[in-house]
Image: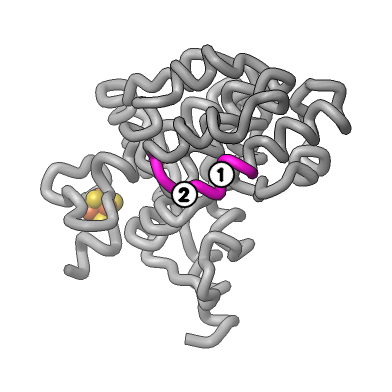
């Protein structure tokens, strides 16, 4: 497929199909949403920490350490002053040990550059070490109630499957076309965007999974391109 072909494919998604997709997932989320500690707060620091812990890590695993982690390091100052070995004790339980140093660096930057407060602008959040567009948007959506979409490999998978689109990029989550679709799916009301993003994430985690997606019980199957062609 040519680059132009891919773009045309993205642009061919009808408003009706998007509406169906959004309606079905919101309705499913109402019945199946996961109860996760970091969703009980709008504290930007707590949400940022959760997103860093969730990088390439299952939410159930993160749940094992998150409440104690936040209790021990309730703000950026506490985290910046923590002993590296103490943080490492938490991180070693969920893997990706490089995050210990990353958390310290982020906490120090928040203290030094932003007076201990998590910034609420995309540009400033992007300055934090190891923080990319997904985390930035997740924090903006969940903590600051902004109209921002989230796209990671899981979201790419469901967009590919349901809408039958494909990226030409090796790292599809960086493809602007996927971000465009994700933005076009956001609910109109800003206040609904946080829940929508959580709904999409939960649906990817529980139904449209990487291995063995549960197509036979999927509420989107009726219009899913992947389901109709496999
Ligand atoms: S029918 Fe299967 S592939 Fe399509 S969205 Fe549902 S779970 Fe994913």
At 88% from the left and 32% from the top, the residue drawn is 113
Q: Residues within 10 Å of mark 2 (few under 14, many from 20)?
A: few
Which one is in front, 198 or 84? 84
- Pointer 1 residue Cβ closer than 8 Å to ligand 1: no
- Label 1, secondary structure: give it: helix
* The residue stretch that appears in magenta: 94-101
**Label number found at residue 99:** 1
**Residue 123 at x, y percent in the picture:** 81, 43
Residue 223: in magenta span:
no
Residue 96: in magenta span:
yes
Residue 198 picture quarter: top left
Q: Residues within 10 Å of mark 1 (few under 14, many from 20)?
A: some
Which one is in front, 143 or 58? 58
**Residue 130 at x, y percent in the picture:** 66, 49
Q: Is residue 24 above or below residue 74?
A: below
Q: CB under 8 Å between callouts 1 and 2?
A: yes
At 33% from the left and 28% from the top, the residue drawn is 29
Q: Residue furthest bottom?
A: 2
- Label 2, secondary structure: give it: loop
Q: Is residue 56 left or right of residue 147?
A: left
Q: Is residue 167 left or right of residue 82?
A: left
Which one is in front, 105 or 81? 81
Q: Is residue 154 left or right of residue 52?
A: left
């Amino acid at each position: 497929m040519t680059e132009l072909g891919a773009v045309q494919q993205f642009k061919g998604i009808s408003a009706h199909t998007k509406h169906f997709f959004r309606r079905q997932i919101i309705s499913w989320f109402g019945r199946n949403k996961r109860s996760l500690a970091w969703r009980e707060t709008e504290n930007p620091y707590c949400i940022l920490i959760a997103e860093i812990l969730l990088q390439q890590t299952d939410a159930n695993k993160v749940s094992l350490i998150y409440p104690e982690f936040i209790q021990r390091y309730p703000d950026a100052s506490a985290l910046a002053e923590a002993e590296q070995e103490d943080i490492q004790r938490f991180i070693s339980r969920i893997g990706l040990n490089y995050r210990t140093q990353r958390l310290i660096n982020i906490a120090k930057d928040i203290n030094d550059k932003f007076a201990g407060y998590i910034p609420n602008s995309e540009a400033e959040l992007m300055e934090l070490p190891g923080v990319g567009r997904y985390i930035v948007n997740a924090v903006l959506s969940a903590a600051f109630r902004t109209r921002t979409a989230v796209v990671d490999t899981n979201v790419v998978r469901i967009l590919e499957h349901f809408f039958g689109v494909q990226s030409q990029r090796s790292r599809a989550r960086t493809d602007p076309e996927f971000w465009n679709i994700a933005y076009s799916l956001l609910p109109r009301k800003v206040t609904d965007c946080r829940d929508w993003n959580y709904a999409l994430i939960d649906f990817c985690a529980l139904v449209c999974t990487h291995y063995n997606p549960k197509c036979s019980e999927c509420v989107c199957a009726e219009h899913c391109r992947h389901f109709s062609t496999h």
